[in-house]
Amino acid sequence: MKKFLSMVLCLALMMSVFAFGAQAEEPITLTMLQRLPASYIVEGNPVIEAWGEMLGVKIEIEAPPISSYNDRRNIILASDDLPDIIYVGDTGSSYAQWAADGLFVDLTEYLNEEDMPNAYRVLTDLELNSVKVAALDNHIFSLPRVQTKPMDTILYRQDWLDKLGLEVPTTPEEFAAVMEAFTTQDPDGNGVDDTYGFAINLPMGAAHRVMTSAFDMRPSEVPDAEGNYQVMEAQEGYMDYLDWLREMYEAGSIDPEFYLITNYEDRDMFHAGKVGAIYANTVVEHYITEMSENAWVDKNFKLAAGAPLHKEGEEVANVYYNPQIWGNYAISASTEHLDEAIAFLDACYTDAVNELLMFGVEGVTYTTFYHDGHYSTKTAEQLANWQKYCATYATINYQCEDKGLLIANGNTEEEVALFNEANNAIAEVTNRVTFVSGGSLPGVAEQNTKIVDAGISDKFGELRTKYICGQIDRDEMVEFLQNEYAPAYAELEAIYAAYEMNK
């Protein structure tokens, strides 16, 4: 494996020679504005030095504290002294204005097989949509930092399943049965009626993709087969989804005060052994984290990572998935090293660079790097060095060139193996359908504000909760969705249609 990594680095060095051309005796210096954690040490960092040597340049990084990064970035962008490469961290209206003001290089003409072959090959059209400026003919003024996330999951108490002789559910019907058992059959064995199946986490998204996947719903920005746009809550499957939640609430399977939950309080209930499943904003990475952090609390604590629910009679769930864009990198229009900056940024979309930035230098931040599993072993000293010299924030692209995970979760080889096993198993029964959200389209923010100001969002939330809790009948809920809610979103649907979102 060490030989393999050495080969990768040698290839990267060879690529850098071709990318940058013949180097002068003293390599040029590229300056960067980076958003890095407080624990990250820039001065004397051997990883940064290795990065520069790999690509034939010297790298000078300014890393303001994360808490004040945006303020420092704004000051720099308002000055006449811009670094060569800037972590912008914004793809909204401010980004569009900076591009219009001519602060960034227009990368549209460079994003081709000759000038930026790595970025051109790695970044998809959907990912690049996030950095296009609609008002400037959809030109590209930065490159996105894309993250490949682990598979979406529903976490279950495996020890509860074992005690009750149950399997991980795969369909809404099976899920409802397991949740009822978690509520009524004393899964923790304490002889007290004090458990529930789960708690609907409204703040984190009641219609989360791991559940809506079984009800033929699609995001509002995704058209149907005929090319028509319809807000998710007005689609036919949405009432089936609410009916399912209502039936579980009537069966007592849902925490009766779910509507009072804020943020991660359902996770607190899960940790306390009050609910047997959590689902909102959960990925396989949390499976390992929960196991390692909570196993010591209860020696019987075991978890299972379940796949998104699919329809009865089917084997795969369609999960709609936004490209995960975590910031973006631009090149200053005032740079004196345009060719070198373009080649440098392009090289940062290779595995060799991002593995270096994520795992570091052999002997300094790790003992052995397992390329296939994207995992490294470290001594205590190397772990301390890794925490100083490496960071996920430091990577320019937080995914592999083949869109795979850059790093497997886990602190030991056993945890990494468990993570990969669960992630791969869920991937086999999940079809991720990527789509672009319409939040950055011109007019969308203003229309959303109108909807909120008109009280539609508040009324929807109130009626949704009342319907799940059995306080209003189905006709009243359907009438609101069809006659008030859907018409309020008509202008948004028209915007999506005009831009042919996700067609």
Image: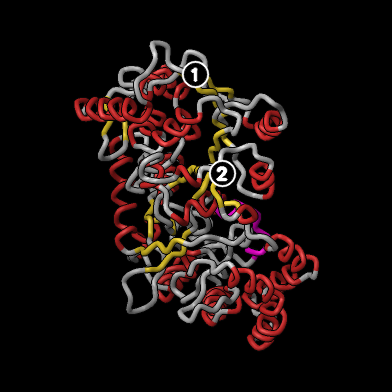
Residue 308, image x, y percentages:
41, 64
Drawn side of residue 88 relative to residue 28, left or right: right
Residue 380 in view (yes/no): no
Name the residue beneath numbered marker 1. 29
Q: Which residues are magenta?
A: 257-267
Residue 166, image x, y percentages:
34, 66
Tag shown at residue 212: none
Image quadrant where one finds the N terminus: top left
Depth order, front residue of 432/113: 113
Q: Residue at x 31, y 35 (%)?
A: 375
The amino acid at mark 1 is Thr
The amino acid at mark 2 is Phe
Q: Residue at x 46, y 64 (%)?
A: 320
Name the residue beneath numbered marker 2. 141
Tell me: residue 332, above or below residue 25.
below
Residue 460 in view (yes/no): yes
